[in-house]
Image (cartoon, helix red, strand yellow):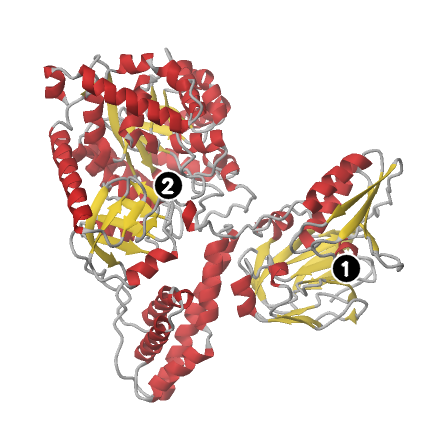
Amino acid sequence: MSDSSQSLTLQAPVAGVVLPLAAVPDPVFASLTLGEGIALDPLGECLHAPCDGEVVQCARTHHAFTLRTAAGVELLLHLGLDTVELNGKGIDPLVAVGDQVRAGDPLCRFDADALALGASALITPLVITEAAGWQLLPSKHREGEQVSLGEPLLVLTRTAIEQSDTRADGPLAERRVTLALASGLHARPAARLRAIARKHNVNLTVQQECSSDNAAASASADSLSALMNLGLTEGATLKLTAQGEAAEAALDAAELLLTTPEAEEHSAPASSTLTAVALKEGELAGLVASPGLAIGPFVSYQLPLPAVHLMGEGEAVETARLKEALLSVGEALANAEAQATRQGQSAEAEIFAAHGAWLEDPDLAAAAGKHISEGRSAGQAWREALDGEAARLVASGNTLLAARVADLRDLQRRVMVELSDDQQAALPELPKGAVVVADELTPSELVAVAAQHPAGLCLAGGGTTSHVAILARARGIPCLVAMGASLIEAANSATNESVILDAENGCLALSPSATQRAEVAERIDARRYEAERAQALAHEPAITLDGREVEVCANIGGAEEARLAADSGADGVGLLRSEFLFLERDSAPSEATQREEYQAAVKALDGKPVIIRTLDIGADKQLPYLRLPSVPNPALGVRGARLWASQPELLETQLRALLGVTSLATLHIMLPMVTEVGELREVRKRLETLASEMGLDTRPRLGAMIEVPSAALCARSLAVEADFLSIGTNDLTQYTLAMDREDPALTARADVLHPAVLRLIQVTVDGAKGHCPVGVCGAAAGDERVALLLVALGVDELSVEPARVPAVKAALRCLNAAALADELPALLALDDAAAVRQHLSAWLAQANQTDITTTTLERC
């Protein structure tokens, strides 16, 4: 340590991987509310003092320590995130308040395995909570860099002018409250109290009221260590005192903070909230990611284990090989956990941490070592060791333990891959017409599974707008997602009998009766007949009964699906999601790579229009090579058009690739997440400059997506600038109703047919009238009933998954759009989406009975 009169060097308190404080997946640390600093993802199991000082605070739950240097600088070391909830479990403190420590002295030891399983992350922030006239210099360490224990980490320099004491005076106010924070007054609420005091420019103190005559301890909100040293727990009675002109306002905010229970940020939704359908015995619920019905044998999708040698080359050789493989997998898991944590994916990070802990289980290592001593190769020894452990878990009769078998199999495969000469295991063969079960699938795995013609797909995880869900819809595979651990448990005990997948009502019948199977088989046959009739006319235009021609285009992810779209009869591509090109890569695709993919899509449509959306990525769905800071609400962060301000080179490369496609007359460019017309103008200006530099005479059409209420309400100004508008109903519904579209508890209510959403669609169409056409490329366009209502609202084009094109065209040919338009005032005046659906269904049923003539029958 260097602690001269002008500089103060802080050492790494533990070996670990560097993470900027702004990237810590906790808003209090990331927003620098507590102060500036840095974070480490620890690789050791002991936290050390980063400098000389006095221990002025030790958290009641042992997870946080505050040191004060002789110069008055206060430093908070916070071991892990959400570790306060462990109540000290797995942490052994080695110092107490008042102790003097030297740089490098141990502060606490901790069980990394226990913390990783119970906390949301092991990331350990080091924060300057009181600078005392010192200034933190920018860190020289890059994100992802590994540092050793005791290595210089941060440097502070004394500022020219020390901050003066600006304590407020004025009116004095008091208030008594009962602390409702389950984890007590720990670092996060303490930091928020200090922020409240500073925002309102008041002196704020907290005192615990005691029933005895002893003087109660109090602390100023200026001192985080003093606040945390109060040791306040849930249920404590507190007296808050504020002095300053805004004393009452500060107490209002402080009371709200201290009496509002903290949200359980990492709790999983209950399975009962997954669907609104009433489940019967033997049924599981899920979210509908791709609609349809299916009957087939219940089959688990599992990659086969890599081939390994049965016998080894001796105990010493094979032991060393196993150790090396375990270290390699452990490092990969640690990196995956760190990346998931940086992206705010706490659930994924916890899984990686748990797998890492299991990998180091001494019993598994001992079992594998025993098999090696019997002559087995390292790979075979590990296989047999984990086979034995899996059998033990299943035989335990404990459902929670049995549910961990899937995790064990994943570890088995990971290590065996390291020990196999065959790094690419062949995909498993699945029986044709099976209902395939998996925990999760990558997009590439979904494509491989689809090639084996499954009847349906059930996933324990995933979401309705995930890339796998999009791919399933594109191929017309009925799919339920977010079904939970009970799905895997059911699959593990399945007898290969047929199940019924109802991806219309969101349920899976595990043991249907013969009568149920016969009824559903009959419905599937009827649907197949309807689909065949629709496919026969799929390449014909969709003209309504009252003579309106509506374009039905396809939503695709790339050139392969462009060919599906062409075969399905699509009138063009209404949305090519270019982000598929950027996923599952170590670096952004080059200009040439992008141009090749875009050109192939344009060629497949053979002169029909192709709309390509520019990269739609952001804090909610990150790329491994694009580091964006974690934010409290990713859906409201840097997404779509907002990305280009910070990542202009990505847009530059993509626009050049798009401008290199021929012919530009059929290629259209669409900008996502537009909130105001200025964003569109900036891109048009850049597009014009690049086209001139490339010597082009033709310019592609440029459009904007309507995904947020501001864009819908300002549709007229956007339509004057744009060549076309396209409504993204998924996000428009989410932002209008303030309901996360991926929250299973809200999915049933986040309905595009809510009158508020429909009114915004109507406002968009009215605003664009006379200026440019309006399409819809959200999932709602693929719902036949919703599609009819969209056309009645005045939408010119619908873009759906390729497999839905024939059915949507067939439905439009049976629609009297003008008659349904007359019904709009009544529909828009209804209270909620459920009422709209009921009214719309009744109207369509009546229309089908009264309006079907001989001509109509021929067309429909």
Q: Position of residue 405 (x, y in %)?
A: 36, 67
Identify whether 615 is placed above or below 685.
below
User: Residue 15 falls in which quadrant of the image?
Assistant: bottom right
Q: Position of residue 773 (x, y in %)?
A: 34, 18
Residue 636 numbered mark, or none: none
Categorize mark 1 by other alpha carbons within 10 Å: few (<14), some (14-19), many (20+).
many
Q: Is residue 589 left or right of residue 115?
A: left
Which residue is found at the position 19% from the left and 48% from the top?
A: 295
Instruction: Say which element carries label 2.
Output: loop
Quarter of the image with the N terminus in it: bottom right
Identify whether 198 is placed above or below 418.
above
The amino acid sitting under disc 1 is Asn
Q: Position of residue 725 (x, y in %)?
A: 38, 22
Asked if one can make out residue 319 in the rendered structure from this viewpoint, the answer is: yes
Q: Is residue 448 left or right of residue 151?
A: left
Quarter of the image with the C terminus in it: top left
Q: Position of residue 375 (x, y in %)?
A: 30, 87
Q: Is residue 458 left or right of residue 813?
A: right
Which residue is found at the position 41% from the left and 76% from the top?
A: 324
Circles 2, 1 touching at the beta carbon (< 8 Å): no
Relative depth, front residue between 701 and 123: 123
Relative depth, front residue between 135 and 269: 269
The amino acid sitting under disc 2 is Thr
User: Total label count?
Assistant: 2
Instruction: Say which element carries label 1.
Output: helix
Q: Earlier in the sequence, mark 2 or mark 1?
A: 1
Circle 2 sits on which residue?
A: 465
Report the Cα–Cα distance between label 2 and label 1: 46 Å
Q: Is residue 422 left or right of residue 103?
A: left
Identify whether 87 is placed above or below 530.
below
Circle 1 sits on which residue?
A: 229
